[in-house]
Each structure stands twice: as C-alpha cells, then as structure tokens.
Image: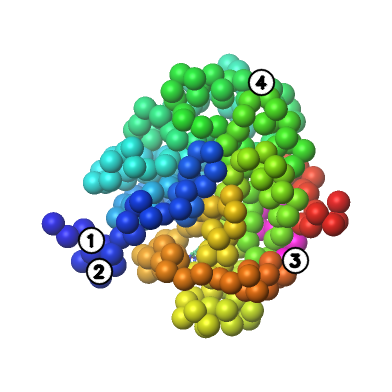
Amino acid sequence: MATPAQESGHDPMPVADMPMVGPAQIPCLGFGTVRLHGSECHDAVTHALDLGYRSIDTAQRYGNEADVGAAITASQVPRGDVFLTTKLDFPNYTLDRLELATRESLSRLGTDHVDLLLIHWPNPRVPLEETLTAMASVREKGLTRHIGVSNFTAEQVRTADETAPIAVNQIEYHPYLGQEVLLKTHRDLGIATTAYCPLARGVVLDDPVLADIAATHGKSVAQVALRWLVQQEGVGTVVRSSSSRHREANISIFDFTLDADEMGRIAALARGLRIIDPEFSPDWDPEQVDDL
Ligand SMILES: NC(=O)c1ccc[n+]([C@@H]2O[C@H](COP(=O)([O-])OP(=O)(O)OC[C@H]3O[C@@H](n4cnc5c(N)ncnc54)[C@H](OP(=O)(O)O)[C@@H]3O)[C@@H](O)[C@H]2O)c1
C-alpha cells in the first residue's frame, strides 16, 4: 500500500541513507516540535515519519509529549527505528524528582525508553553532579539510551562530561550565530552538536548570500541553511515546520553538496544573533575561537 508521502509524489528518504552523528548515532536531520500541540503536532509528526525523518525532538516544557508519543505509536515506523529525544524541565533536575519525572515523560510518550534525555538548560541552583548522577542511573535502568545537555557553555560541557559521559549538547546554531568555540569543545570531547533554530525561526530566509548559493543549486534558502549544518563534522540539526510543503523540502537536502567556498561564505554570515536568550541563560561563549 502506498504511504501518503508516496501518494504525494515524494519518495521517503531510505532510512539507511541518513547520515548519523556522534556517539549516540543521531540521524543528522530531525524534526523539532516546540509550539506544536494537539492534532497539529500529531499530524506533523506522523507526516515527518512518513517522509523519512527518524529523529523527533520534544521536551517536558513543550507540553506535547503525549501528542508526539501518540503519533509515533500510531505510525507504521517501528519504535526502534525512531530516535526520540526529550528534555527535563527545571523542577526535575533533583535526585528526588528526576527518575519519577522521566517515568512520567515515558508514560506520556507511550514508550518504555527514550533514546536521548537532555538537561534542557543549565541550572546553577541544582548541583550538576546531582542531576547527572541521577541521569546516569536512569540510563542504567534502561529508561534512556543516552544522556546529554542543552544550552551548556563550553566550560559547563567539559564539567558535565567529566561527571558522566554525555553524548550531545543541543544549542542554538544557524548561519547568523557562530558557534566555533562550542564546536571545537564538542569535537575535542567526541560529543555531537545538535543545532536548534537552524533557520533562526525564519530570520535567515531573506539572506542574499544564502539566496545566491541556493539559486546555484536550484534549492531554497532553507535547504541551503540546513545543508550547511549537516555537512559539518559532528553536527546534526532539528527543524520544525507546521507546513507539509516545508517538511518535505527540509528533508530534501541529501541530493546536493556545498563546496568549501560556499561553506565558508555561509560561516562568514555569523553576527551573534540569538533567537533564544531567556534571562536564565548562562554567559554564552564567544562566536569565534579568536574572541576568547
Ligand atoms: N534545546 C532548546 O532549548 C531548544 C530551543 C529552541 C528550539 N529547540 C528545538 O529545535 C527545533 C527547531 O527550532 P525552532 O522550531 O525554534 O526554529 P526553526 O526550526 O529554525 O524555525 C521554525 C520556523 O521556520 C519555518 N520554516 C521551516 N521550514 C521552512 C521552509 N522550508 N521554508 C520556510 N520556512 C520554514 C517554520 O514555519 P512553518 O511552520 O510555516 O513551516 C517555523 O516558523 C524546535 O522545534 C525544538 O524541537 C530546542
């Protein structure tokens, strides 16, 4: 029976062809779900899986774990083929809360484990060692296959990795925000970088340099921005779209390659633009190693 994606003329990407990133072997392009809820979230995740996305990113804070989980459960894609990430919310970083909160996430997600459990943001009020020890324990119990962090600075990543080996730091990264310092740190430690807000929530879409490169390849600006990320060593990304057309376009980035000159021109667009910068953010690293 033809899947809806095949009926629409889109051949799902052969799963085995998606490059994997880092020690956790995360599919380099994942589907992000922040701000998606209810049937919109369910339909978007269902469609993403149908198109060939095999990494789905949610979080306790997003309030949509049940919608994400229901879509995965109802999908024809076996659970074992989906790399599922969720993130702990602030109240759940403590020894007395973490395992229970993880089990609550699993219950909402309708699964007995996630593939990656992240600390959503650094929180100086709870000792990092306490959180990571509890995360290592839930990993040992099989509730998550891997653990990692998000929005950590280079120094925080190093401390975390010394405490309990982590697989990834998920950070904001796109053509308008350089992350040279963090990328170097992650590579030194052998952990993956997952880039969130890869399109800077749409801000990069009007960029003339990206438009020029996109025209050369017969691709869209969004496709070039995503391709630039996944072509970098140790880097993957998660992109969100509520539009079926955009979801389809965003996974159609594995049939072209940016050359070194194009990669450099895009890297040169960095201008310190942060989309996500709440008051509880850490002191961010500089964009360039030279600025240290
Ligand atoms: N760890 C963290 O603290 C953190 C923070 C933020 C995000 N995240 C994760 O990262 C994921 C991605 O980040 P994000 O959702 O904030 O931002 P994003 O993926 O950079 O941007 C999403 C926006 O881009 C538009 N878009 C997507 N594809 C497009 C295309 N091909 N052409 C034109 N517009 C397109 C979408 O509009 P349409 O809906 O109209 O397509 C949407 O408004 C999130 O969903 C979440 O899972 C993590």
Q: Where does the image place residue 284, in percent across and percent down from the top left?
A: 77, 48
* Disc 4 secondary structure class: helix
Amino acid identity at mark 3: Arg
Q: Magenta residues, as a range?
A: 270-279
Residues at discs 3 and 2 in contact (Cβ within 8 Å)? no
Q: Where does the image place residue 32, in percent across and percent down from the top left?
A: 48, 52
Inter-mark Cα distance, 3 to 4: 36 Å
Inter-mark Cα distance, 3 to 1: 40 Å
| Mark carried by residue 130 | 4
Q: Nearer the viewer, residue 187 or 116?
A: 187
The residue sitting at 79% across, 57% down in the picture is: 288
Instruction: Indicate left or right for 35 with 81 as reference.
Output: right
Q: Circle 1 is placed at which residue position?
A: 4
* Disc 2 secondary structure class: loop
Mark 3 / mark 1, whichever is N-terminal: 1
| Mark carried by residue 242 | none
Q: Circle 3 is placed at which residue position?
A: 271
